[in-house]
Image (tube, rainbow, N blue to C red):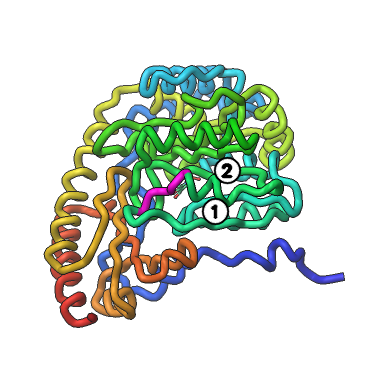
Amino acid sequence: MTEFAARVEGISISGIREVFEAAGEDAINLGLGQPDFPTPEHARSAAVEAIQSGQVDAYTSNKGTESLREAISHAYDRDHGIDVDPGNVIATSGGSEALHLAVEAHVDPGEEVIFPDPGFVSYDALTRLADGVPKPVPLREDLTLDPATVEETITEDTAAFVVNSPANPTGAVQSEADIREFARIADEHDVLCISDEVYEHIVFEGEHHSPIEYAESDNVVVVGACSKTYSMTGWRLGWVTGSNRRVERMLRVHQYMQACASAPAQYAAEAALTGPREPVEEMVTAFEERRDVVLDGLEDAGLSVPKPSGAFYVMPKVPDGWVDELIDSGVVAVPGDAFGANGAGYARLSYATGMEELKEALAIIDDVTARVQ
Ligand code: PLP
């Protein structure tokens, strides 16, 4: 008998934390994975009201309140013209739990999960927690995921592949043609596509598309969250949607690991989804302005960086030792290999930081890049 389960021994705490701890208190932090905006006032007030009226004293239905699931369904229709049955939505503890449900409910021990590398850190860890086999695949030069790479990697043991557009850590947005291809691959190979769309509203060029719009089978599940769109990372409210039979399987996992998402957060989320859109529009406009400033700054410093069209990250190619030197000079960035082996030689910079700090950071980046070649 071993003291700890092998599946836990096989994963480690995200490298991102270590970077924060290495930096001094006065450092400019370009390592953050959350918006620097407040949660919209109407969402906060809805939670306060629900708490004071006693509405949140009890469990909600396992799937979440009916009104929240209707709000999520309505938002898909309003924002993307996607038809989602409120009965096929599970409100979760953030997008993180939603990803966990998708993997747990669909991946048997020994089955493979294909995901982008560099990619969001959870995909590898959740696959291992399900005793599955991680299959990280490299990205194109422009840091998007090539559907052909996914298709070539599929074997008879593949249970699922993950699409993440807009993406963390690259900021890349997949073209509509790619998204259609992912849907076709899910259909033709009878493999599940887990579409992580937590950045669906932070898109600067083009429009957000989801494989669920195009798939003819029910081989797509979509993960969403209030975390990034409404600056609600601390509230822990996300969701997963898919066909009835898939949601029913994911609900079995959710029921025993969570019972229901936090009730105050559900009320806040409903208000965020149905309330005024201005806070989201203002945030996205601010991110786009910052993206442009950061891109110019990085290019002026001589770094090569594909133009990201969404989320709030850029991922330039950087020389050896660049991230360490930058951190020593007072700017925190995350080394690309924290997101997978193919991230080596890159750094992730988040621009969820005020413009003044960003400009200061860019001056330091210029200086560091001139020194570290
Ligand atoms: N998916 C991606 C791509 C993310 O970047 C994150 C958070 O950083 C999540 C999912 C998890 O989101 P949440 O905070 O809602 O659990």
The residue at label 2 has a CB less than 8 Å from ligand 1: yes
Say if 309 sits above or below 31 in the image: above
Give, as a three-letter code, the residue at label 1: Ser
Q: x and y percent of residue 256 in the render? A: 74, 39
Quadrant of residue 74 within the rendered picture: top left
Circles 2 and 1: CB atoms closer than 8 Å: yes
Which residue carries the number 2 mark? 99
> Label 2: few (<14), some or many (≥20) within 10 Å?
many
User: What range of the chain is rendered magenta?
Assistant: 143-147
The C terminus sits in image quarter: bottom left
At horizontal 31% and vertical 41% (from top left) the residue drawn is: 38
The answer to whether residue 293 shows anywhere in this view is yes
Asked whether 278 falls inside the magenta stretch, the response is no
The residue at label 1 has a CB less than 8 Å from ligand 1: yes
Q: x and y percent of residue 304 in the render? A: 23, 63
Which residue carries the number 1 mark? 122
At horizontal 35% and vertical 37% (from top left) the residue drawn is: 175
Q: Indicate left or right for 22 with 63 as reference.
A: left
In this rendered view, identify the residue nearer to me: 212 or 254: 212
Dot 2 or dot 1: first in sequence order is 2
Say if 289 sits above or below 125 in the image: above
